[in-house]
Image (tube, rainbow, N blue to C red):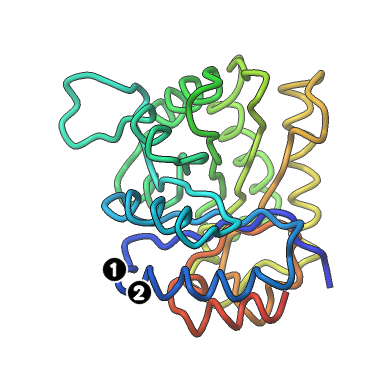
């Protein structure tokens, strides 16, 4: 069993207000007696962020709040976009950037992902980005170069403010929702190669400011295999979430 350090719970667009309140109750119960050294980050849909922020304070929950998306600027004629500055004011410490569903379902380009990373990493007052990368198909030896290109596209030449870190969520797109997660052995090799790319891009950045998470069919049955996780479906129902934390 691997001791987890960072767990990101992505509720996507599958959790309504009533279920969110139930999930927060599960988190309060699960985190009271254990995992005190683990940072848990909750990513609700945007309309729930104010309510979740209020409940975190009310229940004194030891969790952080994140947005599932944001814009590359905090103001402007961008109807329907989400201001990073407003997210920070609402209590969001983190934001997902370049999630596979944003890239491949909603056609978010590498250029947009980079603009978001530049804006968020460069400002000490904006939420910490969690950059998502990963190949679409199980491509064997081609996965490494593909991920390296994604990382370079999003980060090369991007300045990092002193209070910011490099948080990378590796999500093999072919594994998401398949029930067939990447084996721990392959995952560890992939995490090592991602860390090596980050050191190439930022040779003076301490290792303590770099974290790689795994996301791809993480469940209660396999969660003990991964130290840092981006969790989707297993975090979206009270029963599954309770089982998830019970198995860590």
Q: Quadrant of residue 183?
A: bottom right
Q: How many marks?
A: 2
Neighbor class of circle 1 (other Cα within 10 Å; few <14, some 14-19, many 20+) is: some
The front one of 130 and 185 is: 130
Residue at label 1?
16
Give me the disc on residue 226. Answer: none
Q: Which quadrant of the rendered structure holds the C terminus? A: bottom right
Left or right of 71, for residue 216? right
Residue occupying image coordinates x 74% and y 36%: 210
Neighbor class of circle 2 (other Cα within 10 Å; few <14, some 14-19, many 20+) is: some
* Contact (Cβ within 8 Å) of mark 2 with mark 1: yes
Left or right of 104, for residue 117? right
The front one of 19 and 58 is: 58
Residue occupying image coordinates x 47% and y 44%: 96
Q: Disc 2 and disc 1: Cα gap in Å?
A: 5 Å
Residue occupying image coordinates x 45% and y 54%: 43
Q: Which quadrant of the rendered structure holds the N terminus? A: bottom right
Tell me residue 229's x, y (percent).
64, 59
Tell me residue 68's x, y (percent).
40, 48
Residue at label 2?
19
**SS class of the residue under badge 2?**
helix
Tell me residue 226's x, y (percent).
74, 64
**SS class of the residue under badge 1?**
loop
- Figure check: 24 above or below 55: below
């Amino acid at each position: 069993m691997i001791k987890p350090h960072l767990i990101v719970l992505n509720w996507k667009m599958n959790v309504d207000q009533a279920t969110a309140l139930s999930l927060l109750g599960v988190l309060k119960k699960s985190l009271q007696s254990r995992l005190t050294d683990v940072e848990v980050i909750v990513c609700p849909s945007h309309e729930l962020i104010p309510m979740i922020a209020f409940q975190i304070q009310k229940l004194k929950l030891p969790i952080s709040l994140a947005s599932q998306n944001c814009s590359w600027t905090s103001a402007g004629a961008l109807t329907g976009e989400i201001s990073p500055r407003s997210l920070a004011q609402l209590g969001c410490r983190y934001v997902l950037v370049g999630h596979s569903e944003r890239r491949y379902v909603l056609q978010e380009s590498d250029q947009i992902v980079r603009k978001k990373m530049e804006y968020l990493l460069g400002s000490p007052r904006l939420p910490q980005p969690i950059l998502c990368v990963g190949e679409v198909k199980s491509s064997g030896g081609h996965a490494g170069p593909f991920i390296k290109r994604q990382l370079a596209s999003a980060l090369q030449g991007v300045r990092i403010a002193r209070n910011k870190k490099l948080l990378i969520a590796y999500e093999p797109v072919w594994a998401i929702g398949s029930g067939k997660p990447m084996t721990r052995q392959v995952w560890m090799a992939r995490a090592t190669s991602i860390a090596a790319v980050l050191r190439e891009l930022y040779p003076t950045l301490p290792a303590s400011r770099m974290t790689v998470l795994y996301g791809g069919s993480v469940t209660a049955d396999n969660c003990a295999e991964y130290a840092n996780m981006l969790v989707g479906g297993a975090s979206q129902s009270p029963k599954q979430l309770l089982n998830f934390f019970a198995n860590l």
